[in-house]
Amino acid sequence: MGFDVHLVDGTYELFRYHFALPSHRTSKGDREVAATRGVLGTVLMMLEEGATHIGVATDHIIESFRNDLWPGYKTSAGMDPELLQQFPLIEQGLEAAGITVFAMVEHEADDALGAAAAKAAADDRVDRVYICTPDKDLGQCVGGKVVQLDRRKRNVIDVDGVREKFGVGPASIPDYLALVGDSADGFPGLPGWGAKSAAAVLARYEHLEAIPAKGADWDGVPVRNGGKLAATLAGDLELALLFRRIATIELDAPVMDSVDDLRWTGPTPEFAALCEDLDAPGLSERAQAILKDRPRR
């Protein structure tokens, strides 16, 4: 009997709850923990809803190898210190809850999600792999057993969903981002290239290298100012290839050895004390209730 795998973008969830929840400092008053409590709660909710195999990826260090490739790439500079200090705390909390955590240092959480998805999909026992994040970068990993899941909107995105959203298939997502840029990650794309023009050209040619150098040679591509866009791409091709490299998920990121490592078997003995420190003993009670209701295997 097969099973599903759920891979969660812990960095996204931590940001989401930090800005969505009211502040909560511990009873000792020594630290902010609202986002940590929120992420632990949402992962427990996934278990309550029936998830059996879960992995959570985090950016243990915000900076990655991509900062060496592009000086403007995102960093931790300017991040709220009360958010930043919760990254190691949520990793500790998830591990205590019995959840496998991919804490990235050289790579990013996105790389871990993609690498874990590829490994999970290769296992014959796995029916479907859900990458739980709305992040557009992960669209490139969709296909076969792998889909994206926006848990907040309860929206599952398959290959057709990626194409509907961006106008290109999963394989072209890095090329698409190279042209239009990604403000969240800190690289600008190429001047003049927008979402519509990039989608139209890549829907026809799929990858940057296949795009003819002259706009006049773009066969049946419905874009305006094709000649100007082609000239920009020809002049900045090396830059576009660099941006594509930055936008490409690294599937060799260190993750689990086997999907069996993702099977939840219950919280560790340390989880109850950690929840007390978070002023959230109910989280430990929920974990114990889930474990009690699970069939023994």
Image: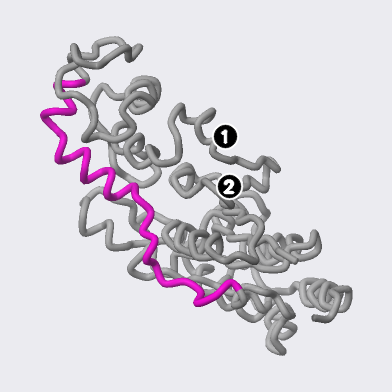
Task: Say above or below: 97 vs 166.
Answer: below
Membership of 243 in magenta stretch = yes
Magenta segment includes 250: yes
Q: Nearer the viewer, residue 202 or 268?
A: 202
Answer with left or right where residue 211 lies relative to residue 116. Answer: left
Crowding around mark 2 (Cα neighbors within 10 Å: few <14, some 14 to 19, many 20+) is many
The answer to whether residue 144 is above or below residue 100 is above
User: On the rendered image, what quadrant is the C terminus found in?
Assistant: bottom right
Comparing 85 with 49, the one in front is 49
State the residue in front, 30 or 105. Answer: 105
Quadrant location, the N terminus: bottom right
Identify the amino acid type marked 2.
Gln
Residue at position x 59%, y 72% from top?
259
Image spot of residue 78 (x, y percent):
38, 54
Residue displayed at 84% across by 81% down: 296
Residue 148 screen position, x and y as percent:
58, 47
Residue 85 appears at what percent x and percent y?
Answer: 49, 69
SS of the residue under disc 2: strand
Q: Which residues are magenta?
A: 230-259
Q: Is residue 147 above or below residue 263?
A: above
Inspect the image, locate mark 1, and give the three-letter code of the amino acid beneath it.
Answer: Gly
State the residue at coordinates (52%, 46%).
Answer: 143
Q: Which residue is mark 2?
A: 148
Residue furthest left as drawn = 235
Residue at the bottom extreme, as displayed:
269
Mark 2 vs 1: CB contact within 8 A: yes
Q: Main secondary structure of the magenta part?
A: helix
Q: Which of the numbered marks, if any, corresponds to residue 268? A: none
- Identify the residue under disc 1: 161
Q: Report x, y in % for residue 222.
A: 35, 12
